Amino acid sequence: MEGGFGSDFGSGGGGGGKLDPGLIMEQVKVQIAVANAQELLQRMTDKCFRKCIGKPGGSLDNSEQKCIAMCMDRYMDSWNTVSRAYNSRLQRERANM
């Protein structure tokens, strides 16, 4: 199969097969953001399940649904607060360099 998978790798930018460092950095940033979102969802699910679900069954009762919703809201609020503080600190440290 001529021109198969991988034969055009890195040549999409017309740079003679050279990889664009800016494009690579953007792809890495996207992959990190996806990994962070997956980790957030996994941790939130684990923590809220352990907290709210006493006896797993075929469905959630009203109190379990409310607990899960409130737990996830609090977890997201906490995550956002920590993220803002972390980003603010990074910006301050970068400015002091």
Image (tube, rainbow, N blue to C red):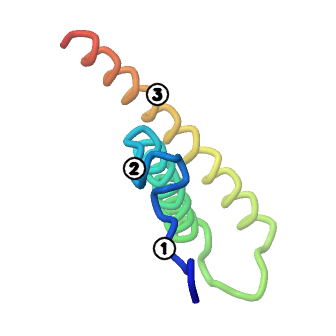
For the residues labelled 1 and 2, the Cα–Cα distance comes to 14 Å
Indicate which disc, 1 or 2, sits on the residue closer to the N terminus.
Answer: 1
Q: Quick one: SS at disc 3?
A: helix
Q: Which mark is residue 84?
A: 3
Density class for disc 2 (Cα within 10 Å; few <14, some 14-19, many ≥20) is some
Looking at the rendering, which quadrant does residue 89 occupy? top left
Label at residue 19: 2
| Front one among 35 and 9 | 9
In this rendering, the answer to whether 5 lies above or below 19 is: below
Indicate which disc, 3 or 2, sits on the residue closer to the N terminus. Answer: 2
Tags 1 and 3 touching, CB below 8 Å: no
Asked if the residue at tag 2 contacts the one at tag 3, i.e. Cβ–Cβ closer than 8 Å, the answer is no
Q: Which of pointers 3 and 2 indicates the residue nearer the eye? A: 2
Residue type indicated by callout 1:
Gly
Residue in the picture at 49% in, 56% down? 11
Query: How many numbered discs sit on the rendered protein?
Result: 3
Q: Position of residue 5 (x, y in %)?
A: 53, 78
Badge 3 crowding class, 10 Å Cα cut-off, few under 14, some 14 to 19, many 20 or more, is few
Q: Give coordinates of residue 79: x percent, y percent.
A: 49, 41
